[in-house]
Structures are given as C-alpha cells and as structure tokens.
Image (cartoon, grey):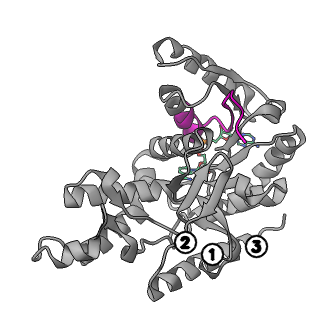
C-alpha cells in the first residue's frame, strides 16, 4: 500500500524514462523521484536538469540520482531500462537482450526490502512484466506493465477524430499483446453508452465499420512509423506511465488496459497481456473481464499463444 510520501524509483533514465520523469514533474505526480541507471553519470545529469525546472513546477518534488537501496521505502518502481527497438526489429526480438538487463535490476530491488508496486514499460512489455513477476516472487497484483494503455490512447484519439467526439468520451480498448497480435474488440467499443456498431449502422453511410478496421491497423503500425521517422517513441508512453502511476498513488480504481497476469479470465492462466483492469493502491486490484464475441475470443487466445511461446523460449 502507498505511504504518504509518494515515492517513485525510476530505473532507466533514457528517452522513455525521462519522458515519464518530465511529465511526472509537470503533473506533480509524487513527492520524491529517484533516478537509477547503469550509467550513473547520465542519471546524475538528468536529476540536475530536472531540478532546475522545479522553480517553474506547480509543486515541490525531491529529485535525485540514487541506487537500488532507495527502493526500500518506495511506493513504486517504474522500469524503463533496456535496449531500444531498432528500425525493422520486432518487439519480441528484443526479448533476450532485455531479460539479461532485468536480472541485474529485480534482484537488488527485492533485496532492498521494497514493498510497493512494479510498473514495467520495457519491451516486449508483456514478457518483461512476466519476467519481473517471476524474478521478484511478488504477488501478481503488485507487478504489472504499461500493456496496451498507449495503444488504447492512440485508438481513442483516432476514434475521437473520426467521430468528432472528445476522446475522453470514447470507450474502446486495444487488448492482448502490446505488439503485432493486439486487436480491438469492436463489440465493446462505445461513444458514451452507444455502441460504435449502432452508430455506424444508423449513420446512413457517413460512418462505417470497414473504416474502423483501418483505424485499428493505424494504431498497430503507429510505433513502427514513429520509430522510422525519429528512431524512438517516448512522449506518449511517458504520459501513459504517469497516468497509470497516478491511479496507483491516488488509489483511483481507474480502468486502464495494463498488462496483468490472467488467472482464469478469458480462459487464460499465467500469461501477462493487456486487458482492462481496475488499478489502485494495490496495483491491479482485479481484471475487468469483457464479454467478447466468439471471433474476438479466438483472436485473444491467438495473441496469448504468441506471448506464451515467446516466454517459453526464455530460460530464467
Ligand atoms: P534508451 O536507450 O533511451 O534508454 C534505456 C536506458 O536503460 C539507458 O539509459 C540505459 O543506460 C539504461 N539501462 C540499460 N541497461 C541497464 C541496467 N542493467 N540497469 C539500469 N539501467 C540500464 O531507451 P528508451 O527509448 O528509453 O526505451 C526504453 C524501453 O522502453 C525500450 O525497451 C523500449 O522498447 C520501451 N518502450 C516501451 C513502450 C511501451 O508502450 N511499453 C513504448 C516505447 C518504448
């Protein structure tokens, strides 16, 4: 459970980690933010740089470069450490390189006596979150990943543009692997409480479900497109991580499509995948199981099978 201090240890002060940190400072997310990186000098430089912005921030925040011992009284450890995706490289290709990185991180965090929640962003995020769960031995509620939170945000943005509606009133999710096998269960997509399928049907040709398929493809290809244009993606994921961390630190019980361990939901057991979950001070309080159509259930199973197979290839 969270302490009153609201302390976060960020492991990995690269582009994603620092986008999270910068956004966290601007949103006054926590009271204390510790930056940890294998490159200590980099973490120190980043702490100095951020500290110079405190005079312009809306609230004070203690920011410093530290070590794993600082996790002992932290509420959250956010992991953005790892090797980056190269143009043309799939997220699953990154797996082996990042698993080795995680072995050097999780063990000292646990040894510090850390009693909070792990939030993982490193790709392939569903697998790296499962690796964190296995290496930490924590209750799975306290270990989860960013999952399809960013993909869902991209989808809501695109649907908002298509229907000319505030994305905050779009209730639609991307679920499954954060990667090529992810998909949108359109049977569960709503504007306010009206289904997207009904809106298309009643629009006299103005809106159509075929266009929705194009939008979901656009969501799936977005990361690769950004990587081709500017080598990496970081602002969107940084802001997604702040959103998730706020749900934990403020005990919000918000619905977010984080990567959570499935324990019987959707007929899956043990695998980590992006699904709508209730997120609060306990971490993933529970999985909110959607009523999927038969075809959607099959797609979800296929996505979980992809994840299961990659995970099995790892020898931890
Ligand atoms: P980056 O190369 O800029 O930063 C990685 C950082 O990790 C570096 O500072 C590096 O020194 C550090 N690091 C490496 N090994 C370490 C270790 N053993 N201990 C501590 N720190 C270590 O990369 P980035 O662009 O910030 O991306 C980080 C990760 O986030 C990648 O895996 C990337 O694929 C992933 N990512 C995830 C999402 C998502 O939606 N989940 C989106 C974008 C990127």
- Asked if residue 61 is positioned above or below residue 141 in the image, the reply reads above
For disc 3, the neighbor class at 10 Å (few under 14, some 14 to 19, many from 20) is: few
Q: Decide: marks 3, 1 in contact (CB < 8 A)?
A: no
Secondary structure under tag 1 reads helix
Q: Confirm or reject: label 2 Cβ below 8 Å from ligand 1.
A: no
Farthest residue, direction right: 111
Q: Position of residue 72 (x, y in %)?
A: 83, 34
- Please state the extent of the stretch shown in magenta in the rendering: 1-21
- Which residue is disc 3 drawn over? 313
Q: At 38% across and 55% down in the image, what residue appears?
A: 154
Left or right for 20, reference 107: left
Say which residue label 1 marks.
265
Residue at 69% of width from left, 40% of height from top? 76
Queried whether the magenta region covers residue 19, the answer comes back as: yes
Q: Quadrant of the N terminus?
A: top right
Mark 2 or 3: in front is: 2
Q: Which residue is mark 2?
A: 289
Is 158 in front, or is 139?
A: 139
Q: Quadrant of ligand 1?
A: top right
Q: CA distance from mark 2 to mark 3?
A: 28 Å
Cβ atoms under marks 1 and 2 closer than 8 Å: yes
Residue 109 picture location, percent across and down: 82, 41
Q: Is residue 112 above or below residue 214?
A: above
Image position, residue 39 (x, y; %): 72, 32
Query: Alpha carbon of mark 3 to alpha carbon of mark 1: how far?
Result: 24 Å
Would residue 313 be found to the left or right of residue 237 on screen?
right
């Amino acid at each position: 459970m969270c302490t009153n201090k609201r302390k976060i240890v960020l492991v990995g002060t690269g582009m994603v980690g620092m986008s999270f940190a910068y956004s966290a400072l601007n949103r006054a997310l926590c009271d204390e933010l510790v930056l940890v990186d294998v490159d200590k000098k980099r973490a120190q430089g980043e702490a100095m740089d951020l500290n110079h912005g405190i005079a312009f921030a809306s609230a004070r925040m203690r920011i410093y470069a530290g070590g794993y011992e600082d996790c002992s009284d932290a509420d959250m450890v956010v992991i953005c450490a790892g090797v980056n995706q190269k143009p043309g490289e799939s997220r699953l290709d990154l797996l082996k390189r990042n698993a080795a990185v995680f072995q050097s991180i999780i063990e000292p965090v646990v040894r510090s006596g850390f009693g909070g929640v792990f939030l993982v962003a490193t790709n392939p995020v569903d697998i790296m979150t499962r690796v964190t769960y296995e290496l930490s031995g924590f209750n799975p509620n306290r270990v989860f990943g960013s999952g399809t939170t960013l993909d869902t945000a991209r989808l809501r943005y695109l649907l908002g543009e298509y229907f000319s509606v505030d994305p905050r009133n779009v209730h639609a999710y991307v679920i499954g692997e954060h990667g090529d096998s992810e998909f949108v269960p359109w049977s569960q997509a709503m504007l306010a409480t009206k289904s997207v399928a009904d809106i298309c049907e009643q629009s006299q040709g103005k809106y159509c479900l075929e266009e929705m398929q194009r939008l979901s493809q656009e969501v799936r290809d977005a990361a690769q497109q950004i990587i081709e244009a500017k080598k990496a993606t970081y602002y969107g994921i940084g802001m997604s991580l702040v959103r998730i961390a706020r749900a934990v630190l403020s005990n919000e019980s918000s619905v977010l499509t984080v990567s959570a361990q499935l324990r019987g939901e959707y007929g899956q057991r043990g695998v980590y995948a992006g699904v709508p979950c209730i997120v609060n001070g306990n971490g993933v309080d529970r999985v909110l199981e959607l009523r999927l159509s038969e075809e959607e259930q099959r797609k979800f199973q296929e996505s979980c099978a992809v994840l299961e197979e990659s995970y099995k290839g790892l020898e931890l």
